[in-house]
Every structure is written in C-alpha cells, then in structure tokens.
Amino acid sequence: MDSFIVVSLIKTVVVFAVLLTTLAYLQWVERKVIAHIQVRPGPYVVGPHGLLQPLADVVKLLTKEDVRPPFVHKALYLAAPFMAMTMALLSICVIPFGPAIRVGPITTWMQLTDLNIGVLFVLAVSSMGVYGVAFAGWASNNKYALLGGLRSSAQMISYELPMSIAIASPLLLSNTLSLRALVESQAGSFWHWNVLHGPFPQIFAFVIFLISAFAETNRIPFDLPEAENELVAGYHTEYSSMKFASFFMAEYSNMITVSCMAVLLFLGGWMAPWPVRYGSSFTPVVVFAFAGLIALYHGFHPARRRDSYTLPAAGLVFLAIAAIFLLPMVQAWLLPLFWFCAKVGAILFAFIWVRGTLPRFRYDQLMGFTWKFLFPAAMLNLLVTGLLVAWVS
Amino acid sequence: MDLVLFLVFALFAVACAINVVVQTHPIASAISLIGVMASLAVLYLLLGAEFIAAAQVIVYAGAVMVLFVFVIMLLNAGTESKTGRSLVAQALGVPSLVALLGILAFFVQRLFPREASSRFGAFTGGSAKAVGKALFTTYLLPFEATSILILIAIVGAIVLAHKEMD
Amino acid sequence: MAAVPISWFLTLSAVLFVTGAAGFLFRRNIITVFMSIELMLNAVNLSFVTFAYQFKKVDGHLLALFVMVVAAAEAAVGLAIILTVFKRRPSLNIDEVNSMKN
C-alpha cells in the first residue's frame, strides 16, 4: 500500500512536469509551424531558433499588471480560470503512455490510474469544462464577453454529441471502456488499429472525432467565440496576466487531451505500427539519425549566419538521442513512449496545420453543420458499425 | 476509508443542498446544485454504480445544469426580492418539514438494521456491460419509450422557443 | 475498513428530498423552484442506487438512468416554457403569473 502511494506520487509529479513543459513548447511549435506556413521565420531571436520564447512569454505574463475590474462578479470571475484549468488537466490522469515497466523491484503501468470507465471519465471531465467558459463570460459583466461565452459553451455542448457517438463506434470494436484494455485490443500491426481494423474500419468515425475535437477546443476553423476581429476577445476579454494564461493553458491542454484520445481510440495508442520482427525497434534510431544528418548538412550551408552553430548543435543532439534509442535497458519504456508521442505529435501538427490554412466558420454555419450533418453522419456510422459487428460475430 | 469519504461528500452534498434553497441569486443556487450532483456521483461510486456515476456527471451535471445556467444568463435573472408573506406560514412551514424529515429518518432506521453496511467494491454488477445488458433485454420497452419522450421534448422545446418568422 | 451502514445513505436521501421540497414550497423565483425539483429527483436517484446495492441487482441503476433521462426532458421543456412566459412579462416571480389574460 505504501509503495503504491509513493509510486503514484512520483508518477503524478513526472506526468505533470512533462505536461506543463509540453504546453509551453507546444505554443513554440505552433508559432514556428504557422510562421513557416506563412513563409516567415517565426520566433528566432530569443534563444537559438526561439527556443527560449516560451520562457520569455511566461515571464511577461507573470509580470503584467493583474487588472481587477470593479464591476465584475468577484467570486465567479476568480473561479472561472481555475475551473477551466482543473478540468483541462484532469483528463491526463487516465491516459496510458505505455505498457507495464519494471523500475527496480516495482512493476508499474505507464499510466496514473486505470478506471473501468476511463472513456466515460474523459467525456465527463470535458462536459464539466464548459462551465469555466460560461462563467468567465457571464462574470465579466461585459456584453462581448457574455456573447462570446454563451456562443462558445453552446458550441462546445453541441459538438460533444457527434464526439460521443464517434467515440462509441470504435468501442464496439474493442469491447471495453478502460483505456488500457482499449490499447491492448489494438495490438499487432497497424492493420489492427481501430481506424483500419474489424468488420468496419472506423475512418469516418476518426474524421468526425477530429472535426468535433476542433470545435470542442475552440480551434480554427471553429474559433469564432474567441476571434479578435469579431468579438474583441470573446470570453476572456476582461482577463489579464495569469488568469488569461490559465485560459490559454486550458485550451492547449484540451488540445493535447483530445489528440491523446484520438490516438488511443483510433490509432493504436502506444503500439508500434509494425511488429518488432520487422524492425520497429530501430525506426526511432533511423528517424533521429536522419534528422541529425539533415541538421548537420544544413549547418554547413546555413541560410542565416547564426545557423552555422545552432544547426550543427541540433544535429549532434539528434544523433545523441538516436544513440540512446539503441540502449537495450531503456528500450522497454522509451519505445512505446516514442510511438505514442509520435502519433500525438502528428495529430497536434494536423491541428496547427489546419489553423494556418483554413478560414473560420460563421456561427450559424457552425451550428448548422453539427446538427444537420455531423450528428446524423455519426449516428449512421454507429448504426453501420453495430450492424456489421453483430453480423460477423 | 469508506466512512471518511462518505461523511465528507455527504456533508458537502447537504451543505450545497441547503445553499440551493437559501441563496437569493439563481446563479449561486445553480452552482450549489452542480456541487450536489458531483458529490452524489462520488457516493454512487462508493455504492459500486460506476456507469450511473459517469452518467450523472455527463448528463445531469454536464448538460442539464448547463441548460439551467444558460437560461439564467439569457434571462439576466437578478436576486429575488423579499415580499411580505404571512409570518404564520413561515413559522409553521420549516418545523413541519423538519417533522417530515424526522418521520422519514425514523422509518429508515427502523427498517434497515445497523448491520447492513456497504463496502466499496462489494457490488460489481454496476459496470457498463451489466447496465447495457439489462437496458437492452429486460428494460427494452422503457428504453424505447424514453427515446420517444426525448424526441417529444426536443420538438416541444424548439416549437416553444423559436422566433416567429415575419 | 470502516463500512458505511445502508441506512445512512437513505437518511441522506431523505434529507436531500426534504430540502428540495422546502425550496419548492418556499421560493418564489421560478428557476429556483425548478432546481429544487431537480434536487428532489437526485435524492430519489440516490435511494434507487442504494437499494440496487442492497439487493445486489442492477435494476435500481436502470431506474435511476430513466429518472435522469426524464428529468433532462422535463428540464428542457420546462425551461422553454419559462422563456416563453418571460417574453410576455419580464418577471421571474411565480406570484405574478396569476391571470390567464395578460
């Protein structure tokens, strides 16, 4: 019993430290990717290739004046960012990052806790996340904020419906609600992943889930409630410094959560795409070595003067990481973690890619889209999946 | 451990319930009601009802209460005004409710002997699988009836709340 | 491991029910009255789940699920009615809705 509590505490600290660092650097990745889509360098000056930019942003947000408008509803104004942050961070507790590993005498799972109703827990927590937005809009006592808050929460609860039904379809294939068992039911190669497997490959459910995820997290093309040129700043108009940073962190944390859910439900979680006997243990080595060699090559023909020492340094770091993947003692936990992070990273890249590419929907188009197209499409998918599963078994 | 969890969440539920009734502003009542529902979800988990606990948070606390909060925000409901009501009604009302509570509690204690106790994990039949099986076999007719009821409610709400096209 | 007597769950359910009844009878704001009704329904759900534990059957959970569904439908229609009545007279006091003609 004691070792369980100690191990859980250590895991919690590790997971949350990694999560908060990832949130900060996800913002860096987003700014860089959008910049390169728009053919400009992005953050470049603060640290090599702008890597210290998130630190500068944190310092800026912490030292900004914390404005407390006198006309707001005090209790809810202060509580809303907490609610948003808490619900956003809570879903990480049930996400499995890898299989069971041995650390010394202790065998533990790479997951904070496994619930029998893990999928329902994530859905429940995201339902409660609507309140942070709604109360932020109302407590600000400002018509732009109220309108933005109401629109945003109406959008979030409308898109929860096709999301839940798109989640139900691969559950019919995997037959379990526990996230750990869900990943284990997709073992084998990528043909066993829920997106390609079974009597009915869940490609439509995957697409519907991703579209609903864009709307749930208020990302472009569904970010009208927080668009600057439409509603001043939507529901966080009256918030400054740390409280604004909380909403920001809550949005990115929601993004990470829905990407993790997409990977767990559809893309096989931490399972490798091809079995070990075809060399899946060497794929990360090859990928990182390749990245290191490209960085080294460009370091010798740099586009800008500074790159002549930052790029070779980056190349050496990548080659070192490739060498780490060859050590057999870390392969047991590093390889599943690599596959999980690679898949989640691919979906986050898709989120950022869509942000840099598409214009935004108008509010009535957005609501019409979910109620008239997405929800019936998700129901049809569930119906067909159910029929085929019942017919085959 | 069960006892500590039960006492904490039961006291929180009662405090929030009294707050629902006592607060003058509807938003404060709504937030207290969300607190009641969340603590009831924990109590369902203690009784082994894992699917119902998740359904409570998703449906009740996450959708029905959002609806209440929306309507309060849209109607811009303010604090309730005190109107002059007869003092006799107030003096008789609260004690009679407490008397009703006393009668209910007495009968509960009489009917259920002290030894019947609950332990976390003693009932494992509340999983989603068990609920789903019963829902689609024994309770199929009520299931279909409630789905038609929800359809009627959707159509009714839209008809009542939509604006006339000029 | 200290266990919790079943009668305590039922007593809690009774307390919540009586509190909901108090709110329903004493408050004048229509939305607060509605929320007291939801509180009463939640208290009844707790009783159902407790009895499901007592008799080790899942039927109590099913009944609680149906109560939740019916309460959701009722909340939707009831709030739509409140919105419609509010359009006519801008007051949420149930004492003022006391005539059939406006």
Image (cartoon, coloured by chain):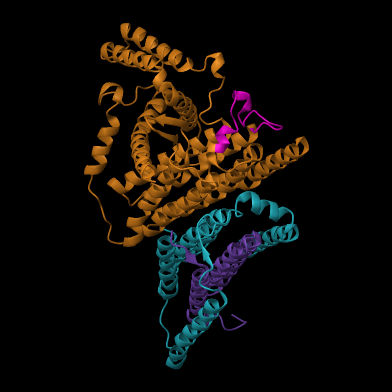
Q: Please, is residue A4 above or below residue A130 in the view? A: above
Check the rendered structure and report the hue given to chain A: orange
Furthest toward the bottom, the residue is B88
Q: Nearer the viewer, residue B50 or A83?
A: B50
Task: Using the rendered view, name the quadrant where residue A277 is placed.
Answer: top right
Q: Please, is residue B74 above or below residue A366 in the view? A: below
Residue A366: x %, y % from top left: 56, 44
Horizontal side of A9 relative to B123 (left or right) equals left
Image chain in purple: C
Task: Using the rendered view, name the quadrant where residue A189 is placed.
Answer: top right
Residue A29 is a magenta residue: no
Residue A198 is a magenta residue: yes
Residue A244: x %, y % from top left: 33, 46
Check the rendered structure and report the hue given to chain B: cyan
Horizontal side of A200 relative to B109 (left or right) equals right
Whether residue B33 is visible here, answered yes or no, is yes
Give the overall secondary structure of the magenta segment.
Answer: loop
Task: Using the rendered view, name the quadrant where residue A36 is placed.
Answer: top left
Span of residues in magenta: A181-202
Furthest toward the right, the residue is A391
Residue at the image position 21 percent from the left and 43 percent from the top: A63
Q: Nearer the viewer, residue C89 or A70?
A: A70
Residue at the image position 41 percent from the left and 42 percent from the top: A251
Horizontal side of B59 relative to B142 (left or right) equals left
The C terminus of chain A lies in quadrant: top right
Residue B46: x %, y % from top left: 50, 58
Furthest toward the front, the residue is B115
Residue at the image position 64 percent from the left and 45 percent from the top: A375
Q: Nearer the viewer, residue A8 or C13?
A: A8
